[in-house]
Image: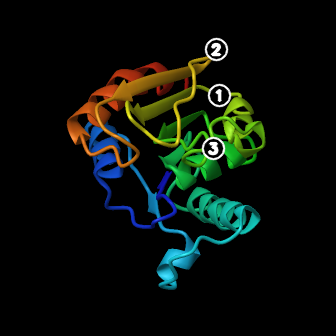
Amino acid sequence: MLGHGAAGGVGTTDLVAATAVANQAGIAVALVEQPYVVAGRRSPAPAKQLDAAWKTVVDELRSDALEGLPLIVGGRSAGARVACRTAAEVDAIAVLCLAFPVHPPGKGDDPTKSRMPELDAVAVPVLVVQGESDPFGTPTAAPGRTVARVPGNHSLPNGDAVAAAVAEWLPAVVPAA
């Protein structure tokens, strides 16, 4: 299950590339648009509302199409943050973060602006695919967390590089299911 970034939409190059890799591996992908995007608004809702909407979708899918199946959650940017914050609650087996926003641009020196606690709290395997020149920063690798740096910035425009990183990581997490 993959979610979009704050700018909205599930048609970004990185989400499309990750979805294609998963589908080629025989993994179904649910692309989830947050309610604010569906309603035509541009500004994301507060984190608690985003997380609640995400968990509602997981519950609905688990009661139908995904019943009994292992779940990998993820998304791009703000969607990656939602996936990290909710991974334990939805019993995810892994998390895929595309362009995880470590901090707002220009705020890397301010520890109060860091989003690393959200990423650090994830207790299942994590792949972070990050653009080499992402102004939102780059997380470090850690036990259970792989960081793949690819050409580009926060928009991750190189779908082939994103696909390669996801294709390398997926086989390591899917058999654990």
Between circles 2 and 3, the one closer to the viewer is: 3
Return the disc, 3 or 1, that comes first in the chain's sequence: 3
What is the CA distance from the residue labelled 2 to the residue labelled 3?
A: 26 Å
Q: Is residue 77 above or below residue 175?
A: below
Between circles 3 and 1, the one closer to the viewer is: 3
Instruction: Mark yes or no: residue 155 visible.
Output: yes
Type of residue at label 1? Answer: Val
Q: Position of residue 173 (x, y in %)?
A: 50, 24
What is the CA distance from the residue labelled 1 to the residue labelled 2?
A: 10 Å
Type of residue at label 2? Answer: Pro
| Position of residue 171 in the picture relative to residue 159 (left or right) | right
Q: Position of residue 115 (x, y in %)?
A: 68, 42
Residue identifier under label 1 = 124
Instruction: Check whether the beta carbons of the residues at disc 1 and disc 2 lie within 8 A of each other.
Output: no
Q: Position of residue 145 (x, y in %)?
A: 58, 22
Residue identifier under label 3 = 107
User: Image point 31% across, 35% down: which residue?
Assistant: 162
Which residue in the rendered view is the most extreme toward the bottom?
A: 39
User: Image point 62% across, 37% down: which residue?
Assistant: 108
Between 139 and 14, the one lying in front of the other is 139
- Quarter in which the C terminus is drawn: top right
Return the disc, 2 or 3, that comes first in the chain's sequence: 3
Type of residue at label 3? Answer: Lys
Between circles 1 and 2, the one closer to the viewer is: 2
Instruction: Check whether the beta carbons of the residues at disc 2 and disc 3 lie within 8 A of each other.
Output: no
Residue identifier under label 2 = 143
Between 98 and 125, the one lying in front of the other is 98
Q: Is residue 112 above or below residue 4?
A: above
Return the disc, 1 or 2, that comes first in the chain's sequence: 1
